[in-house]
Image (cartoon, grey):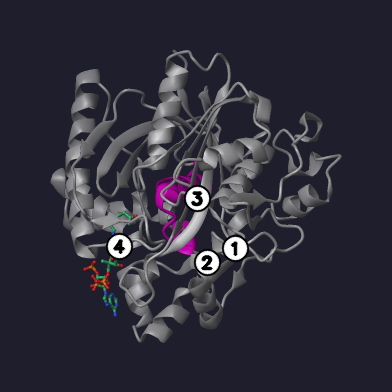
Amino acid sequence: MPPIGIDAVALAVPTGYLELTDLAKARGVPSTKYHEGLLVTRMAVAQPYEDPVVLAANAARRLLITSGRRPADIGLCVVGTETAVDHAKPISAYLHGLLNLPERCRVFESKHACFGGTAGLLAAVDWIASGANRGRVALVVCTDIARYAMNTPGEPTQGAGAVAMIVSANPRLLAIDVGLGGSYARDVHDFWRPLNRKEALCDGHYSITCYLAALTSAYGAWKEACGEAGVNVELARTCYHVPYGKMARKAHLHRLALDGITGAEAEASFTREVASSLDLPSLAGNIYTGSLYMALASLLHLEGHEIEGRRIGLFSYGSGCTAEFFSGRVVAGAGAFARSLQLAAPLDGRRRYTMDEYEALRRHEDQADFAPLGSIEAPADAMAFLGVDGERRVYARLAPIEESTMPNGHLGNVININKLQAAKLRLL
Ligand code: CAA
């Protein structure tokens, strides 16, 4: 069986963010609590027109352009989210339409808190391993808007964004160790989002305990599976689910302690093996399903070249709860390919909101899903949720991506693009 894994990645974030220094000042908290206590710097804030469908479509479209893949190549499209826009119609259905994906395509949404994207990724790997893909690739998109009530401990750990991934045979970034994942599940109430509210509820400190208990068990199961398969468990780097950077730090120190490594050696290991994966997440905040994969993008962006050929670990945690510890080998050439994907570019050039703007956006978010068509304002060149018409959500549709316009990874080669595409491409 050829290697199977993550072939390409792209991110999308809203156009604006809140500097956490501003939030700290407004909430009467020392900014060091956020910067050093939680290891967060900025949190992305979504406008009403930047809903989870729009974020998913922006990430997926960017992925198609930067990776050189065509919509026709895709035979499976899974969206992981815990910010669904409908009880029945999945975000993947909107995405299928917006990207002009083929009719012969398996399309669904996957939910288990922040684990939904990993469930999609693992389903995609199995789909390819089974041979059902018949030469085609999978598109897996994680998209979420993380919201807690204002003036609560969770507020500085909000964020918004999407991560799109191509999963394929002979991947260009990460070959996953198929069949070695360590799973864990337990019915707990650490974090949840009741149907009648947009904001999450959580038992914050308990959720940290649940995360670490899940890591203990899933990591142990992964090591056992590796032992049985004769696979070396030495990891060059590990990416964790990042609700906020400090959680990943706690997780890494916890994992090392399980292996008897503590003190200065553990601190040095965090700096060497985890810190670079927290760079991009610290600028976007928690993006729930996509957080682990934004951490992976951050790692590949900053250190892809150095870790080619080496095994890395990934830990995915979904409250409620379930988790998986799995691993993969960074592919030869991944560093240069990651560079060509310009993974960090969507985080540049965003607008910094004032506290007043942020609070005004928060106050209006409850109505946004029910706003009549035309009452939501969006820039003329944006991919946008435009409101509801006859109880149906309406989106400004991206022009179909023509095969002739695909740049084969070279962004400058795009030809024959309409105004909307041109505007989007300027963001690349
Ligand atoms: N300077 C530097 N550090 C400071 C400080 C200061 N002035 N003041 C406090 N700190 C440190 C504290 O010592 C603490 O560090 P440690 O964790 O290393 O002990 C850290 O800052 C946080 O302080 P508190 O524990 O007092 O913070 P809090 O009680 O206000 O809230 C939280 C922290 C519970 C994580 C809260 O932000 C929260 O509820 N977040 C949402 C839930 C969450 O993210 N849980 C994570 C696990 S669940 C999961 O992963 C799923 C998911 O995506 C939600």
> Label 4 amino acid?
Leu
| Magenta stretch: dominant secondary structure | helix
Side of 16 where 24 appears, left or right:
left
Mark 3 Cα-neighbour bin, 10 Å: few <14, some 14–19, many ≥20: some
**Any part of residue 340 in sight:** no
Q: Residue at x 53, y 82 (%)?
A: 356
As measured in the structure, the alpha-carbon distance from the residue carrying label 4 to the one carrying label 3 is 18 Å
Asked if labels 1 and 2 touch by Cβ distance under 8 angstroms, the answer is yes
Asked if ligand 1 lies within 8 A of label 4, the reply is no
As measured in the structure, the alpha-carbon distance from the residue carrying label 2 to the one carrying label 3 is 13 Å
> Label 2 amino acid?
Gln
Q: In the rendered image, which quarter is residue 313 located in?
A: top left
Tell me the SS state at disc 2. Answer: helix
Tell me the SS state at disc 3. Answer: loop
* Residue named by callout 1: 371
Q: Is residue 145 above or below residue 4?
A: below
